[in-house]
Image (spheres, grey):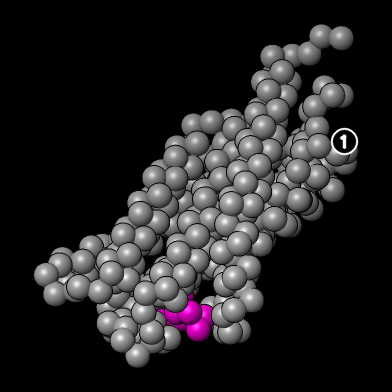
Amino acid sequence: MEYSADALAAARSLQTFTYIYTSMATFWTYDYACSIHEEWTFLLQSRWTKVKGLYIVTRYTPFLLFASHLYLNFIPDEDPNKCQMINNICSCFSLISVICSESFFIIRTYALWNHNRIVLAIMLFSFIAVIVACVGVLFATTANAPVEVSVIPSITGCYQTSGSDELFVPFVLLFALELGLICLTLIRAIQSWRGANNPLYTVLLKHNIFYYACGLFWSIVNVFASLFLHYAYNVMFQDFQLVILAILATRMHLYLWHADRHLHSDAHMFIPMSDMSSASRSS
């Protein structure tokens, strides 16, 4: 049986999408296996706080995201409604993941600014505005958008046929948020360049800058992919960005907690780590 060029292009995009998700799941599993000792030390020996709960949600939400997407990509199903429902569930997991990851670094930026309430108010207002706008755009364009499955029997999965062009908007908003946060971090780094001798403070600065730089880069990639690619290609890097940010947020938190535990006691902190929560061994 011969298929049209459009059907073949759609099938190739679904295959590529499946390969990328499988690679992401493999990478996430490898990262978990490499850090399992440090992770369980943290989970068992640190006391329960809100930030520890935030860590757990950030760390394990990608597992639910992968399970949903891999089910969608590998289990044959010709029902577009079921496909749309699973896509909406995945969108919820993606949203939870990015909210938790960004929350970690808003807390860290707040700590870098010595718990300045004005800075906190600006960050929270911007963060909430971006989240509300992203939720509105995301569900307005995907909740009831038509989806298609491949006409080729051996190709599983589905893709959105309309509305995906608007999905660049959440990444533009995320880019703007992270650009503002990295500016706050750089301003603080310049202000404290000569005065801060605490190694944990230096680690915080480096982690923040690296995290925001990764977020900015992948936001740009997703904006261009949403605008210029078609079929399943235009969404294939969206969850990749969110998973990378989740891994960075949790890995950096683990590193900082272990460094704090190994090198310092709470009473001698330059930064009040117990108040910051995201870097304390009491988290």
State which quadrant residue 20 falls in.
Answer: top right
- Dot 1 corresponds to which residue? 76
Measuring from the top left, give residue 99's x and y in whole percent: 54, 66
Foreground of the two, 273 or 34? 34
Tell me: residue 74, above or below residue 60.
above
Tell me: residue 77, above or below residue 98.
above
State which quadrant residue 224 falls in.
Answer: top left
55 left or right, relative to 79: left
The residues colored magenta run 276-283
Q: Assign the N terminus to one quadrant of the image.
A: top right
State which quadrant residue 64 falls in.
Answer: bottom right
Measuring from the top left, give residue 254's x and y in whole percent: 50, 66
- Residue drawn 71% across the image and 18% down it: 8
- Residue drawn 35% across the image and 54% down it: 210
Tell me: residue 114, above or below residue 92.
below
**Residue 72 in sight from this viewpoint:** yes
Tag 1: residue type? Pro
Residue at the top extreme, as displayed: 2
